[in-house]
Image (spheres, rainbow, N blue to C red):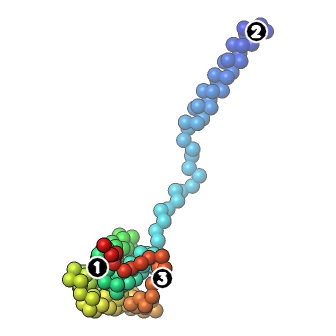
Amino acid sequence: MSLKATSFALLTSVLTLSFLALAYAQTPATPQGPAPQAYRPGLGDLMTMTVQPRHIKLGLAGREKNWSFAAYELHELEESFERIVRVWPMYRKTNIAELMVATTKEPMEAVSQAIKSADAARFDEAYARLTATCNACHQSTERAFVVIQVPQTSPFPDQDFRPVKP
């Protein structure tokens, strides 16, 4: 075979293989099975990950009379409840959306008013009432063994709950 013919054969082979590789790379892979389901945390997981820390931080901020941080944590607690309702509108036979509103609306409004008025005694009373409604909710959903209390110490050693001094 002449050099010209060999070169042409080699070039043709390289181009053919390149086109085949390109075609293969663009062919979508066939699914090997059903797509994995999105992670859906359990109701208890959401309570432990989102509600409990916000409840604690709210109480600690109120105890230190850090009203701006307490307002922030109250808002975060409200959002935690909203997330729970989105993920778990029903839990077993309990309508979580209705239960959350029924149990938390009034005490959270009272906490909000205490924060706005910077009234420590009023905050303590409203926060205790909010905590009691958490426990009433646990009792009504057959989780009476989950008892929430006003925090005595901080589980957040890396956070200062005192108000920032100007």
Q: CA distance from mark 2 to mark 3?
A: 80 Å
Q: CA distance from mark 1 to mark 2?
A: 87 Å
Q: Amino acid at mark 1?
A: Trp
Q: Name the residue that disc number 2 marks.
A: 3
Of circles 2 and 3, the one toward us is 3
Question: Measured along the vertical axis of the image, is residue 27 above or below residue 55?
Answer: above
Q: Nearer the viewer, mark 1 or mark 2?
A: 1
Q: Nearer the viewer, residue 133 or 39?
A: 133
Quickly name the residue at label 1.
67
> What is the quadrant of residue 54 in the picture?
bottom left
Q: Residue at x 29, y 75 (%)?
A: 68
Residue under label 3: 155
Callout 3 amino acid: Pro
Please report contact status of discs 1 and 2: CB closer than 8 Å, yes or no.
Answer: no
For the residue pair 97 and 71, the one nearer the viewer reads as 71
Q: Which residue is at a point 52% across and 59% down the rendered structure image?
A: 36
